Amino acid sequence: MAKSGNVFDIDRLHQYVEFMKENDITEIDLEQNGEKIRLSRSGGVMPVAASTPGPVAAPTAAADDDEAAEPDHIVTINSPMVGTFYCRPNPESEPYVQVGDMVTAESTVCIVEAMKVFNELPAEIRGKIVAVLVDDQTPVDVGKPLFKIDTSA
Amino acid sequence: MYKRILIANRGEIALRIMRACKEMGIETIAIFSEGDRGAAYLDLADEAYCVGPARSNESYLKIDRVISAAEVGNADAIHPGYGFLAENSHFNDVCRNCEIDFIGPLPASMDQLGDKNTARRMAREANVPVVPGSAGLITDNAEAAKVADEIGYPVLIKATAGGGGKGMRVAKNAEDLETALKQAAQEAEAAFGNAAVYLEKYVEEPRHVEVQVIADQHGNVVHLWERDCSTQRRHQKLIEESPATNLPEDIRTAICEAAVRMIANANYSNAGTVEFIVDKNHDFYFIEVNARIQVEHPVSELVTGVDLIKEQIRIAAGEPLAFTQEDIGPCQGHAIECRINAENPDRNFQPCPGTIDHLIIPGGKGVRWDSHVHAGYTVPPHYDSMIGKLLVHQPTRKEAIATMLRCLDELQVGGIATTASFHKKVLTHPEFIAGNIDTTFVERTLLD
C-alpha cells in the first residue's frame, strides 16, 4: 500500500479494491481532509460513491460481477404483510421518506394498515432511498416490493 | 347476493369455488403462498394476494393475513374450502366480527359438532345410533363383563390416553375379556403412563358410509344421499362412490334420514357430511360430523344434479334451498371418484412433487376432471399430494367402473408418479367389483 498521496487517487482506489478482494474485506472507510469515502463489497466489487457535499467522481472499480439488472448494493424492501400502504403518518404530514433520503435500520419508511391496525414498518437496512415503488393508499401483499435502497450510499 | 368472495384456500378446491362464483357473476379474490406464486389457476381470479411463505402455518393458516386480504380486496364473504381454516371456529368468528360472511355453519355449530363427546350426545338425543360403549372408564373386571354383555361381543378395549392403535385389544367373547383387559391396561401404562380403559363395541369389517347434507338458514334440511368411502389407506380416502353398493334401499334411507335428524337437531346450516360406520349386519353407527364441504363432494353432485358450491354461497347469503327432498328423488345412476395423488404406489406411496411436463386428460361421456394442474405445473412439496379428482357418472356401477378404467388408461401425467396404476388394481379386483369392500380392504388385499 502507498504510504502517502491522495487517498482518492483512482489508482489508489483500484489498489484498495484489490486489497479488499484478496483479503476478503467487506468495507473500508477512508477519510482525507474532511472528505470521506466508503468502499463496500458483498461477494463482488461495487462502485463507490462519496458521501460528501462536493461532487467527487465515483470511480467504478474493476468489478468481477457485472452490474447487470440490479447491482448487489441496491436492495428492495418488501412488504411483510397484507394491507394498505400509506407513505405518510397522517394525511397532513409529509411522507416518511422520499427519494434521496438516507435511512437507518430503525427508520420508519411507511405504514401498512391491516384490520384497522397501523403498522409502522422499519427499513431494517441502512442506505439511501432510490425509488418508491408503490402509490400511496394502495393494497399490498406479502413480498410486494415497496422501496429500493442503495446500501452503498 | 355477494359481489365479491375471497377464497381462503388453494389448488383444486380454490379453482372449484372460483368456477361457481364466475357462473354466478360474483368476483373472486384468491390468496396464495410463495409456494403457489405463478400457479395458472390464480389468473382466473379477479384479484390475488400473497399471504406469506410456502409453509401453510405462515400463509394459508394466518388468520390476520387472510382477513387483511379480504379487507383490502373488499370481500363480502369468505369461502374456506376444506382443510386449512375450514373448521376453525375462531376464524369463523373473526370473519363475522369483521362483517365478512363465512360460507359455512355458525361457529357454535362447528364447536358443538367438533367435540366428539358432545356430538355423540346430540346424536343420541336425535335418535341416531352411536357406537355402543361404556359410559365412562372401566373400574374393574366385573363392571367390564357387565358392560360387554350389554353392548355385545366382540368388544374393543381402548386406552383413554391412547393413540396410534396402542392400548387397544379386541375381546371376542367373555372368556377372552379378562386377559384382553389386562394386556390393554399394561400396554397403555407402558406407552402412555395411564392404564385407564373404556369399552366400545367392535365393529367388524366396517364400511365407511357418509351422508351429504345441506341446510339453509330457514330450517330446511335435505340430504343428497350417501357416499361409500371404504377404499382407504391409512385412513386416507382413495376412492368414493355413490350410491353405496350392496346396501338395501331401506337401510340407505334410514342412514340418510338419521343424518338429516342429526343436522336438523344441531341447528346446523350450510353443507355438512355425517359419517357412519356400517357393519356386516347392516347396523349403522354415527361417528362424527364434518362441518365443511369435502373433497369428494362432486360424487354427490353427479348423482343428484346439484351444484353444492353454488348452494353453499346462496345459503350463506340467506337464500332458501333451491330444492326439496322430493325434488332430489333417488340417486341418478352411479358415480365414482378416484383421487389422483402425486405419490408412487410402488414405493409405499412416497410423495412425488415435481414438474408435470406432459398432461393428457381423459374425456368422453360421463367424465369429470376437477384439477388445477396443467402441463408445465410444478407440484409443490408443501401441501397435500392430490393433483386432481377423476370422476365418472354412468347409469350403472358396472358401466361406471368400465369408464373409470378407460379414463385411468387415457390419463397421462408425465414428470411425476401418480396413484393411477393403484386405482386400476382396485377397480379390477373381484372383491371391489362385487362390492364387498370395507375399510380394511386395501390393506388386506392390495398392499404387501
Image (cartoon, coloured by chain):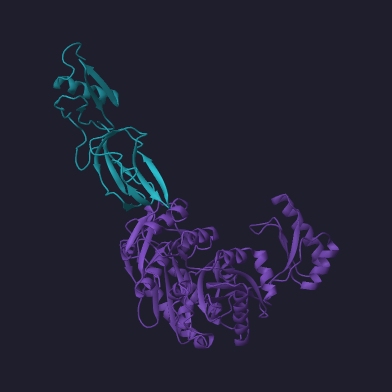
Image quarter (top left, top right, bottom left or bottom right) of the N terminus of chain B: bottom left
Q: Decide: is B243 above or below B158.
A: below
Report the front residue among B110 and A5.
Answer: B110
Q: Is residue B269 visible?
A: yes
Residue A4: name its quadrant: top left
Residue at 24% x, 25% y is A39
User: Furthest-right residue in view?
Assistant: B142
Which one of the lettered chains is coloured purple? Answer: B
Tell me: A119 left or right of B212. Answer: left
The correct choice, above or below, for B149 with respect to A131 in the image is below
| Foreground pick, A149 / B227 | A149
Find residue B377 and report its horizontal and vertical position in percent: 33, 61
Using residue B88 as the reference point, say whether residue B137 is left or right of it: right
Q: Nearer the viewer, residue B148 or B13?
A: B13
Residue at coordinates 76% horizontally, 62% vertically from top-left? B136
- Rendering quarter of residue B351: bottom left
Seen at 71% across and 70% down, the residue is B202
Q: Position of residue A45 (x, y in %)?
A: 23, 30
**Would residue B381 be visible to someone looking at this image?**
no
Q: Quadrant of residue B256?
A: bottom right
Q: How many marks?
A: 0
Task: Please state which of residues B196 and A151 is positioned toward the viewer in this rendering.
Answer: A151
Q: Position of residue B80 (x, y in %)?
A: 46, 64
Image position, residue A97 (x, y; %): 28, 39
Q: Colour of chain A?
A: cyan
Hey, which residue is sitting farthest front in the picture? A92
Q: Is residue B415 left or right of residue B155?
A: left
Task: Give the quadrant of the C terminus of chain B.
Answer: bottom right
